[in-house]
Image (cartoon, coloured by chain):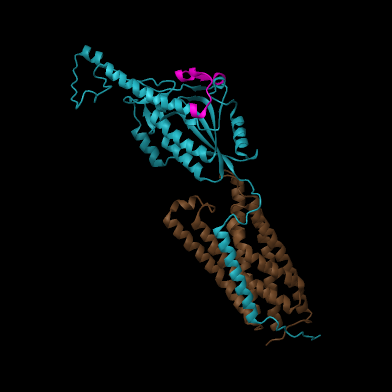
Chain colours: A brown, B cyan
């Protein structure tokens, strides 16, 4: 039963990494296809469809992560995995709430801001990105450290490098999220880096999964 | 096959939380730095999405929209709103003023001139005249970095004037007497019901000369005028205007677009956005239809910077 939980947990986290790769590729496409004017109807349509698709994907990734770390939490190997699940569950919700609250506040103060979303000159809008970046990142910090722990447990170098890169990417994510609106190359680079990280983690988790299948390397429970 | 490897206790919960805490501190520091100094981490070239905004200035310029002796007039406030939007919009790097207007009232032309001066201070502004770019409209486009004119356009007519119709002779013939009660002798200066005195004419002449000298100063501030004939108020064809220094180039609309892109440092494929005033609502349309006057109203002593002069229609 425990092996099944472990297998399922890693399988779900692996799935989340797979969808993350697709999500990042869509992110790159959105930047490339970004409409150049309000009359660029085809691009606006394409970007809107991709945007909706990426929203659905981000929700899917989030659910897979919660399920995956939920299975690992059930193993009772470490409390940290349970904290990871909790952090992944709560912090994105807090981030979203912060975003909504700041948006509403900004809108009530000056409704015209909504029509001229200029992140460069508008401090309030930069504040939205600031809080969102912090809140969203905390859950991912927990996850990257938990993956790092798994890499130590299973002595998997690919997973270890992937988790270190993941942690690094999360730490520098505010730079990307606060500047991506005006520096599109930075946004593309951020997404490309995310693809590499997810490939590393996906590959590492696949190797870990294999060891579980062959039942050769399996942690004892405390 | 049950060769279980003992679970590594190297990384306890406590040490993992320590890593998380350190990472959170690091992320807060990074976020604060990028919030306070947004340009610190920018070292890459931007993908260019900057565009050219086109503002069309057409028809006689007046303070309000409607029908006057100038014909159907365009309230300059709608152009001012468009210019203010262009100033605020970071994606608009340059503005091309597409002009076909004979000018209008001095006050309306001046209002628009100040706004375009403000715009030219912040963004690249180029003017393209197709048709008329005369008098008050010429004053409006003076702050542009370049004035480009189509081959068969008329520009110039630097000057101001005022038309005053006097009905005294006609009223006398008809036996109609008009009584005016005034606080002082010049209060009804320009009244159509009495003849103009020499003093009245002198005062009017001074007003016109004062407004003209302001116009002339603006022309000399922005242009190098070769021929002083420019200040006689005569209109010029495109070729003549180029010769005397009123304009920079003769070309087509496409030429004007390309020159604007070049001056603003934009790529050849930079998009063009025509900035238009908001479309009137159904209520506006109904209201305007209702109040549309049947006859043209003669303005009282409006000082005009307009060529060709308007014609009074009964």
Q: Residue furthest top?
A: B173
Relative side of A11 to B284, left or right: right
Furthest-bottom residue in this view:
A222
- Placement of A155 over or under B299, stated as above or below: below
Question: At 66% across and 71% down in the image, what residue appears?
Answer: A144
Q: Quadrant of the N terminus of chain A?
A: bottom right
Left or right, residue A182 beside residue A156: left
Q: B31 or A217, which lies in front?
A: B31
Query: From which residue to which does the magenta span run?
Result: B220-240
Q: Is residue A116 visible?
A: yes
Question: Is residue B75 visible to us here?
Answer: no
Can you give x and y, in whole percent of width and height, for residue B96 in the image?
55, 35
Task: Using the image, determine if residue A134 lies above or below residue A107.
Answer: below
The image quarter in which residue B284 lies? top left
Task: Verify whether residue B226 appears in magenta.
Answer: yes
Percent position (x, y) of residue B43?
65, 53
Q: Quadrant of the C terminus of chain A?
A: bottom right
User: Would you place residue B193 above or below residue B140 in this image?
Assistant: above
* Position of residue B255 measured from the top left corner of the image (x, y, whole percent): 61, 30
Magenta-span inclusion, residue B246: no
Seen from the viewer's position, the closer of residues B109 and A7 is: B109
Relative side of B293 to B102, left or right: left
Query: Residue A202, position in %: x, y?
Result: 72, 68
- Please tell me which residue is depicted at 28% across the width and 16% down the height of the picture: B198
Residue beneath the point at 45% across and 60% down = A104
**Residue A60 in the image: above or below residue B115:** below
Task: Give the side of residue B259 with respect to residue B307, left or right.
Answer: right
Q: Quadrant of residue B179?
A: top left
């Amino acid at each position: 039963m425990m092996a099944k939980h472990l297998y399922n947990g890693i399988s779900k986290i692996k799935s989340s990494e797979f969808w993350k790769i697709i999500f990042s590729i869509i992110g790159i496409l959105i930047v490339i296809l970004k409409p150049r004017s309000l009359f660029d109807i085809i691009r606006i349509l394409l970007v809107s469809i991709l945007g909706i698709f990426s929203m659905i994907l981000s929700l899917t990734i989030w659910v897979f992560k919660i399920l995956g770390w939920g299975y690992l939490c059930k193993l009772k190997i470490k409390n940290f995995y349970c904290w990871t699940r909790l952090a992944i569950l709560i912090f994105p919700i807090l981030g979203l709430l912060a975003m909504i609250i700041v948006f509403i506040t900004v809108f009530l103060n000056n409704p015209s801001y909504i029509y001229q979303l200029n992140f460069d000159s508008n401090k309030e809008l930069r504040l939205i990105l600031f809080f969102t970046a912090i809140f969203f990142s905390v859950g991912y910090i927990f996850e990257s450290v938990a993956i790092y722990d798994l890499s130590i447990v299973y002595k998997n170098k690919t997973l270890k490098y992937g988790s270190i890169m993941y942690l690094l990417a999360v730490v520098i994510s505010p730079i990307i999220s606060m500047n991506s609106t005006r520096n599109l190359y930075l946004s593309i680079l951020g997404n490309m880096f995310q693809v590499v990280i997810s490939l590393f983690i996906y590959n590492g988790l696949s190797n870990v999964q294999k060891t579980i299948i062959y039942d050769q390397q399996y942690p004892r429970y405390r | 096959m049950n060769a279980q490897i003992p679970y590594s206790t190297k990384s306890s919960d406590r040490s993992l939380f320590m890593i998380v805490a350190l990472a959170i501190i690091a992320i807060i520091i990074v976020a604060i730095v990028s919030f306070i100094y947004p340009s610190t981490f920018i070292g890459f070239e931007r993908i260019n999405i900057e565009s050219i905004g086109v503002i069309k200035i057409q028809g006689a310029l007046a303070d309000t929209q409607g029908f006057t002796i100038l014909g159907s007039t365009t309230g300059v406030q709608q152009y001012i709103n468009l210019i203010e939007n262009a100033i605020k919009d970071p994606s608009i790097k340059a503005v091309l003023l597409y002009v076909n207007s004979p000018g209008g009232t001095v006050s309306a032309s001046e209002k628009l001139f100040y706004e375009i001066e403000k715009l030219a201070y912040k963004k690249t502004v180029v003017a393209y005249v197709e048709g008329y770019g005369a008098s008050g409209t010429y004053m409006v486009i003076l702050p542009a970095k370049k004035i480009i004119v189509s081959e068969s356009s008329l520009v110039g007519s630097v000057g101001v004037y005022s038309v005053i119709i006097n009905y005294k002779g006609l009223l006398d013939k008809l036996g109609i007497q008009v009584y005016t009660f005034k606080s002082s002798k010049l209060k009804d200066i320009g009244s159509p019901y009495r003849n103009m005195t020499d003093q009245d004419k002198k005062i009017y002449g001074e007003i016109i000369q004062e407004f003209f000298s302001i116009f002339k100063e603006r022309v000399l501030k922005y242009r190098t005028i070769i021929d002083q004939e420019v200040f006689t108020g005569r209109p010029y064809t495109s070729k003549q205007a180029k010769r005397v220094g009123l304009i920079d180039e003769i070309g087509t609309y496409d030429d004007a677009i390309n020159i604007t892109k070049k001056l603003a440092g934009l790529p050849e494929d930079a998009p063009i956005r025509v900035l238009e005033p908001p479309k009137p609502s159904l209520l506006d349309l109904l209201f305007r239809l209702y109040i549309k006057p049947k006859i043209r109203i003669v303005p009282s002593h409006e000082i005009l910077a307009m060529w060709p002069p308007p014609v009074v229609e009964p």
